[in-house]
Image (spheres, rainbow, N blue to C red):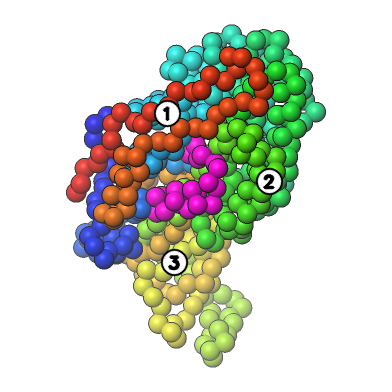
């Protein structure tokens, strides 16, 4: 892949992604199309990366591709030197097509199809997670040199999207799994966990890190070279989350220093998804239809006005499209107004609906909005995570175009980081076992620099 196939432009000096939203709205308003569209600020992805490096200096991010697999995002992250968490053959293919070295990929799906394990094997992807005996037997048959990572269950009761109901071995099962791996001649290199997506409880990380330590010790006793801790994902992606990223990292860092101190030589990675992409994307939708309902119980709005109606707005993206996050990701999406309401403008009880013929296709059950018209625009911010990645074209409604922007200073910063190359992973073993820990070869930077059409 030499050039990317996405609509990309540089922000002129003094312009922000918000100005591009405005410009695109103006352009579209001159036509009859008024299709929904996204503006994605790749500079925001860079900002997140720098914020990550500041807050978690010991932890290398392996971006979770499932969260948003847009080429522009993946290319930006590849240039920044992150690794990637892939869960399928197609995700591995996608990331490798950008020139990412297989040592920068973790196949972080504990339950894999045999043919896909074979694919990973023939394509040099060695790190992979497991949480059952059956998986170990599959890997022993299909992969010659897998570096296995034992995924443990966590207390994810306070996460928005629970994952440990599906994945992760119980602590009491871990010794048996490690013994089985030994028996099969497999190489277990560490432990991973995921506290659940949209985690609101920093204590879950602390407990999981302590649990991982226990499993490390079991592995060391059995003679494994345990040198990789993977603290998974679950980090918030926008400022309106219930917990701030830095509140979580303030708990993670001391736990890492306690259980996995720097001189333990353990390499620490994570699999952030939401964190990197949520706030980079703004979705802009157009009101395509509107209904006025006369309320039986009219009420005063506190300014002496009688509000005797509620409004239904229909917009051109919905739950079968970008707003699948409402169903799958338990998201609560609220619009930002495009036109600022006048200070004394009456507000109405409103619901917002998607364009399909299904009654399920409701974006907002109730919110207060002014009286708007067909053809007006609404903005939804923080729409980068678990949105475009899982949207469909059900009922024939197409996915919105995405306009990628970045400022020149941000672009130069990305190029600089790219030119510096990637850090060598700190790798060693606490066990003095010969041939256990040959130092890994230096990680390679992608063979091709990301390029994009400049429009
Ligand atoms: C979904 C997923 C992630 C990403 O989770 P976020 O909450 O978006 O950070 C990371 N690792 C695994 C194994 C996942 O399934």
Q: Is 263 drawn above or below residue 350 in the view shown?
A: above
Circle 3 packing at 10 Å, graded few (<14), some (14-19), many (20+), is: some
Residue on which the image places disc 2: 255
Q: Give the CA separation, mark 1 to mark 3.
A: 43 Å
Q: Residue at x 68, y 46 (%)?
A: 255
What residue range appears in magenta?
44-66
Residue on which the image places disc 3: 336
Q: Give the CA separation, mark 1 to mark 2.
A: 27 Å
Q: Residue at x 65, y 30 (%)?
A: 191
- Give whichever of 212, 357 is nearer the camera: 212
Q: Give the CA separation, mark 3 to mark 2.
A: 39 Å
Circle 1 packing at 10 Å, graded few (<14), some (14-19), many (20+), is: some
Residue 416 image point, x, y percent: 31, 45
Quarter residue 74 falls in: top left
Element type where label 2 sits in the image: helix
Residue on which the image places disc 1: 443
Q: What's the magenta bit mostly, secondary-structure-wise?
A: helix
Element type where label 3 sits in the image: strand
Q: Of the numbered discs in the image, which one, if any, rests on residue 236?
A: none
> Looking at the image, do the residues carrying marks 3 and 2 touch, with CB atoms under 8 Å apart?
no
- Residue 65 located within the stretch drawn in magenta: yes
Residue 187 image point, x, y percent: 62, 17
- Give whichever of 110, 80 is nearer the camera: 80
Q: Earlier in the sequence, mark 3 or mark 2?
A: 2
Quadrant location of the N terminus in the rendered image: top left
Q: Earlier in the sequence, mark 1 or mark 3?
A: 3
Q: Is 373 drawn above or below residue 394 in the view shown?
A: below
């Amino acid at each position: 892949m030499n050039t990317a196939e996405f609509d990309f432009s540089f922000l002129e000096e003094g312009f922000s992604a918000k100005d591009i939203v405005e410009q695109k709205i103006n352009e579209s308003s001159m036509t009859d199309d008024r299709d929904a569209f996204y503006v994605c600020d790749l500079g925001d992805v860079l900002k997140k990366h720098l914020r990550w490096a500041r807050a978690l200096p010991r932890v290398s991010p392996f971006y979770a591709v499932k969260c948003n697999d847009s080429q522009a995002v993946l290319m930006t992250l590849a240039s920044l030197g992150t690794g990637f968490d892939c869960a399928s053959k197609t995700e591995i293919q996608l990331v490798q097509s950008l020139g990412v070295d297989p040592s920068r990929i973790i196949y972080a799906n504990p339950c894999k199809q045999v043919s896909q394990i074979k694919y990973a094997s023939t394509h040099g992807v060695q790190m992979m997670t497991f949480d059952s005996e059956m998986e170990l037997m599959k890997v022993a048959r299909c992969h010659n040199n897998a570096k296995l990572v034992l995924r443990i269950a966590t207390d994810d009761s306070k996460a928005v999207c629970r994952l440990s109901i599906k994945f992760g071995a119980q602590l009491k099962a871990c010794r048996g799994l490690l013994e089985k791996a030994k028996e099969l001649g497999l190489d277990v290199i560490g432990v991973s966990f995921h506290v659940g997506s949209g985690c609101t409880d920093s204590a879950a990380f602390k407990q999981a890190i302590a649990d991982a330590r226990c499993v490390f010790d079991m592995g060391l006793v059995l003679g494994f070279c345990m040198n990789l801790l993977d603290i998974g994902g679950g980090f918030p992606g926008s400022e309106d989350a219930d917990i701030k990223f830095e509140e979580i990292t303030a708990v993670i860092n001391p736990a890492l220093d306690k259980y996995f101190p720097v001189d333990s030589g353990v390499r620490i990675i994570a699999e952030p998804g939401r964190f990197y992409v949520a706030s980079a994307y703004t979705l802009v939708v157009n009101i395509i239809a509107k209904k006025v309902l006369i309320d039986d119980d009219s009420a005063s709005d506190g300014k002496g006005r009688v509000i005797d109606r509620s409004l239904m707005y229909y917009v051109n993206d919905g739950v079968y499209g970008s707003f699948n996050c409402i169903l799958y990701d338990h998201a609560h999406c609220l619009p930002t107004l495009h036109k600022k309401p006048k200070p004394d403008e009456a507000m109405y009880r409103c619901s917002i609906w998607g364009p399909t013929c299904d009654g399920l296709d409701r974006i907002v059950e109730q919110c207060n909005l002014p009286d708007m018209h067909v053809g007006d625009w609404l903005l939804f911010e923080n729409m980068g995570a678990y949105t475009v990645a899982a949207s469909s074209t059900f009922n024939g409604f197409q996915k919105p175009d995405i306009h990628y922007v970045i400022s020149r200073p941000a672009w130069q910063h990305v190029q600089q980081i790219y030119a510096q190359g990637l850090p060598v992973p700190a790798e060693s073993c606490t066990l003095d076992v010969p041939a256990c820990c040959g130092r890994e070869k230096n990680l390679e930077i992608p063979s091709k620099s990301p390029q994009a059409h400049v429009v």
